Amino acid sequence: MTDVRDQIETLRREIAGVARDCGRDPDTVRLMAVSKTQTSERIGAALAAGQILFGENRVQEAALHWDGLRARWPEVELHLIGPLQSNKVKDAVRLFDCIETVDRAGLVEPLARAMEKQGRAVPCLIQVNTGNEAQKAGVAPGGLADLLALCRDHGLGVDGLMCIPPPDEPPALHFALLKKLADRHGLRQLSMGMSGDFKKAIPLGATIVRIGTAIFGARPVAAETDEPA
Ligand SMILES: *Cc1c(COP(=O)(O)O)cnc(C)c1O
């Protein structure tokens, strides 16, 4: 498992280097280990390397791994980065420390209710479909202001924005758009950049880069479908 540790250490250095090169404090860019489809052993290797922030894209898979691990590693911070179905909201609120994928009005009330019931104010990010892709989750850029207002009406704490750029377009355009939207609405957190493009996301303001492949190696192809969590 030294490969996982080596990859994490290399990434930490790379992220800090890119941050410094563009005049940012390296501490303002957090490395998220995207642990979907990984075995407990490989997740354990990341934990042993001091990794604290993890992302999962499916609620049930996350519960399977993390219900046990979190008891041993209470400092872990777990983010939901996949689409959230309304019937999984309760579990998501119980399990995650941040829900990065608030993407539609229909989630807001159920989330607010579950948080109140569980006495757990889970910070949220809004996922923006910056490429206006029909098959992709996220609110269209033009719908962000309304969704944000609805979240605020219901007392949801929205800390920032998240996006997944279309695979066939320059990601920097999408990162720049997300940054512009965040600035317009006074939001601090920007979850953007993955294994292939995080070096472009940092100069454009990323505060969280979500890295799977570059830490753990390639995933099985079946894991790449964008099914609801
Ligand atoms: C899988 C996934 C990632 C990690 O992608 P890599 O290319 O493996 O780094 C990041 N964000 C989301 C939303 C994902 O589903």
Image (cartoon, grey):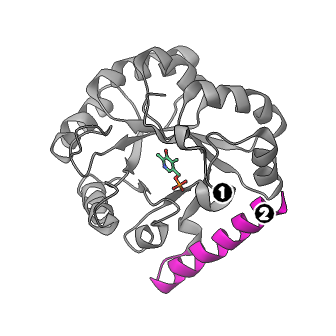
**Residue at left 60%, top 56%?**
213
The residue carrying mark 1 is 217
Query: Viewer-proximal residue, 48 or 224?
Result: 224
Residue drawn 54% across the image and 31% down it: 58
Magenta region, residue range: 1-25
- Residue at 53 percent across and 82 percent down: it is 20
Name the residue: 32% across, 68% down. Answer: 172
Magenta region's main secondary structure?
A: helix
- When the figure is inspected, residue 152 is found, relative to residue 50, above or below; the finding is above
Q: Position of residue 113 (x, y in %)?
A: 43, 16
Residue nearest the observer in this picture, 185 or 220: 220
Contact (Cβ within 8 Å) of mark 1 with mark 2: yes
Q: Position of residue 179 (x, y in %)?
A: 31, 61
Label 1's element?
Answer: loop
Q: Is residue 147 magenta?
A: no
Question: Is residue 111 left or right of 208 when viewed as pictured?
Answer: left
Up the image or down, 65 lies above or below 114; here it is below
Q: Secondary structure at mark 2?
A: helix
From the viewer's perspective, tell me whether residue 61 is left or right of residue 23: right
Q: Is residue 108 left or right of residue 26?
A: left
Point out which mark residue 52 bears: none
| Callout 1: CB less than 8 Å from ligand 1 | no
**Could you tell me the amino acid type at mark 1?**
Gly
In the foreground, 157 or 91: 91
- The answer for how far apart the CA atoms under marks 1 and 2 are is 9 Å
Which residue is denoted by mark 2 in the rendering?
A: 3
Q: Position of residue 193 (x, y in %)?
A: 45, 61
Residue lying farthest to the left in this orientation? 142
Quarter of the figure that contains the N terminus: bottom right
Mark 2 belongs to which amino acid? Asp
Q: Residues within 10 Å of mark 1 (few under 14, many from 20)?
A: few
The reply to whether the magenta stretch includes residue 13 is yes
